[in-house]
Amino acid sequence: MSSTLLATAAITAASLLPLPLPTEPPSGPAPEAQQIQVSGTLDAADGRLKRGCKDYHYAYSVTSDSEDWTFDITMQDRTGKGVNAQSLIGPNDPESGVLPFRLCRWATKPGRFTLTGALVAYKGTSRETSVPVTETFRLRKRNR
């Protein structure tokens, strides 16, 4: 019974609150947010999948008006299985460089690999621009 009384009191109190007055819409067109200029590249050379566990590498570059950016990079094998992931954060990481990654032949299928990057540049707390970056390369089975 007390829960019914409490619900009635809450409804009564809510009906006594003042309603906000309608505001006029701003005159003129709304200002458009400026896009942040950003682009990126990924570059990996074709090669041979070497015996054992070996280091390979790919290059990246970021060009942006902002020094505040993130570049999340994933690598998938020919079946779509993820085999590597790395994240870069500006201004802590350089705008271009070479990133190493390790693959083991016994656990890796030779063929086409895909690097997929999500590059996002930020300006303040309310503006961001995203661009996708993709590169494919082939690691062939080693000849005997």
Image (tube, rainbow, N blue to C red):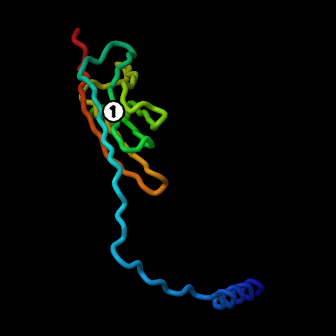
Q: Residue at x 64, y 90 (%)?
A: 15
SS label for mark 1: strand
Relative depth, front residue between 118 and 54: 118
Residue at image location 26% in from the left, 34% down from the top: 135
Residue farthest toward the front in the current orientation of the protein: 28
Q: Which residue is mark 1?
A: 61
Q: How many marks?
A: 1
Q: Is residue 1 above or below residue 104?
A: below
* Identity, as a three-letter code, of the amino acid under mark 1: Ser
Q: Position of residue 116 (x, y in %)?
A: 32, 38
Mark 1 residue crowding within 10 angstroms, few (<14) / some (14–19) / many (20+): some
Asked which quadrant contains residue 26, the reply is: bottom left
Where residue 46 appears, as percent x and y from the top left, is 23, 22
Left or right: 91 as drawn, with respect to 144 = right
Seen in the picture, residue 103 relative to 69 is either above or below; the reply is above
Locate residue 144 relative to residue 106 in the image: left or right.
left
Examine the image and state in which quarter residue 78 appears.
Answer: top left
Give the residue at the far right of this rendering.
2
Q: Nearer the viewer, residue 119 or 110?
A: 119
Q: Where does residue 85 sit, x and y in percent of width and height?
A: 41, 33
Q: Position of residue 100 (x, y in %)?
A: 39, 23
Q: Quadrant of the N terminus?
A: bottom right
Task: Identify which residue is drawn at 35% across, 33% down.
Answer: 75
Query: What residue is drawn where x is 31% and y is 44%?
Result: 132
What quarter of the picture does the C terminus occupy?
Answer: top left
Q: Quadrant of residue 90?
A: top left
Q: Residue most toward the top?
A: 144
